[in-house]
Amino acid sequence: MGYNASGSDTSREAIEFGRQRGIKNIEAVQSDEMPQEGGFDVILALDVIEHIKDDTGAIKGLEKALKPGGALIITVPAYQWMWGVQDEVAHHFRRYTMSGLADAVKGSGGLRIVRKTYFNTLLFPPVVIVRALSKWFNLKERESDFDISSRFLNSLFYFIFNLEIYFLELFSFPFGVSILFVLKKNV
């Protein structure tokens, strides 16, 4: 689309996976490495911050990497009480509430919240049921909460998840499996 985009991940396996699919301008980095200072108009940290022990420090680093007036878009998993196998497998340090993520953002000092909402709300009930059943029956030997080998269910869940895009244009959700923040760097 003509954008000058780049990407990074701490997983060399993820970088290699992307390169095999033709994605260019991506690199493996250490978890404490931040992008170049003041060089980006937009940074996407999609399900990233929960993987970093010092989340406030990471957000400060991302803020420094933005140009004045730049945007930072963050998504994170919601509700610590929903902790499950997927969090263990993915090496998360935490899940968030809206106020918890807002506190981490406030620590940066140079970002203002433009939009905040929960999302993945329509799938919230089945996710809660799966997580509750896993805890009640001590089902810890699974590799993922998302190991679904049904094309029909995958298609159904994909449709439901993407349906939320239309609702999010109209309003913010009061709860959900994940949280979305859109932030702007002060000029």
Image (cartoon, rainbow, N blue to C red):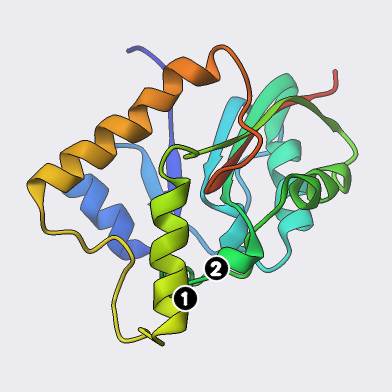
Question: Could you say which is closer to the camera, residue 137 or residue 15?
Answer: 137
Asked if disc 2 and disc 1 are in contact, CB closer than 8 Å, the reply is yes
Residue 65 occupies which quadrant of the picture? Answer: top right
Q: Quadrant of residue 117?
A: top right
From the top left corner, tell me how far across and down residue 33 is, in percent: 61, 57
Report x, y in % for residue 94.
64, 66
Residue 92 marker: 2
The residue at the point 29 percent across, 79 percent down is 142
Secondary structure under badge 1? helix
**Badge 1 is on which residue?**
88
Is 9 rendered above or below residue 137?
A: above
Question: Horizontally, is 104 left or right of 45 in the view?
Answer: right
The answer to whether 123 appears left or right of 18 in the picture is right
Q: Residues within 10 Å of mark 2 (few under 14, many from 20)?
A: some
Instruction: State left or right for residue 153 relative to residue 174.
Output: left
Give coordinates of residue 92: x percent, y percent.
54, 68
Secondary structure, mark 2, is loop
